[in-house]
Amino acid sequence: MQSGLAVDGILDDVDRVTQGAPSPPVVGMVDPANPPSRRAPLRWAVGGVVPWLLLAAGQVVWIALDKRMVWLHIVIAVVTLFGAAISAIGLAHIVRPERFESLNRQMFRRNIRGHVYVNGAIETLLGVAMMAPRARRLVPPMGLLYVTYLGGNTIRRRRGQPRR
């Protein structure tokens, strides 16, 4: 390192590559001096759910006060609850990825944990889009792309074809 201080970090490999020495692969993005706690993913998940719980409470108040189109309120409430469930499942992928690895092994060959995180992020985004009124029109194409992605990988995995 240029400054003379021996601090390990994720950018140390950049200096080694420029000096011509081969560098080891970067294992993770965690700074060893400040590792996150074991409860950090749970705290992130709870922090992400709280605003949507407030939105759901607001919808309950809206249904109680506005009596004009009851059927529309019911449909919106069901879509919101379904979106909250999908978001919760997506956040569960991030908080407890080991519980989803066996399912993802059926669809993917390599980097199972990475695919669990990607699937969790996609499901969380789908759920959030279902709960946000202005983003609901994006849900059908996003859902179709996600189902195509999962179905295509499952078929490819069962046939034994390599990924392109």
Image (spheres, rainbow, N blue to C red):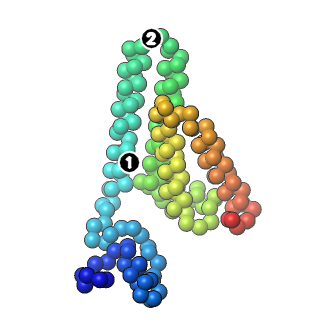
**Looking at numbered disc 1 in the image, what kind of residue is underneath it?**
Ala
Q: Is residue 112 above or below residue 132?
A: below
Q: Quadrant of residue 4?
A: bottom left
Locate the N terminus by quadrant. bottom left
**Looking at numbered disc 2 in the image, what kind of residue is underneath it?**
Lys
Give the side of residue 127 with respect to residue 47, left or right: right
Residue at the far top in the pictured view? 68
Compute the Cα span from label 1 to label 2.
34 Å
Residue at point 27%, 71% (across, down): 33
The one of 90 and 136 positioned closer to us in this rendering: 136
Q: Mark 1 points at which residue?
A: 45
Mark 2 secondary-structure assignment: loop
Residue 132 x/y as whole percent: 46, 34
Q: In this view, does 103 lie above or below 8?
A: above
Lower position in the chain sequence, tag 1 or tag 2? 1
Whether residues under marks 1 and 2 lie with C-beta atoms below 8 angstroms apart, the answer is: no
Mark 1 secondary-structure assignment: helix
Residue 51 x/y as whole percent: 35, 37
Residue at the far right in the pictured view? 159
Q: In this view, does 4 lie above or below 156?
A: below
Q: Mark 2 points at which residue?
A: 67
Residue at point 44%, 83% (across, down): 17
- Residue 85 visible at all: no
Residue at point 66%, 57% (across, down): 153
Q: How many marks?
A: 2
- Residue 153 visible at all: yes
Q: In this view, does 19 lie above or below 101?
A: below
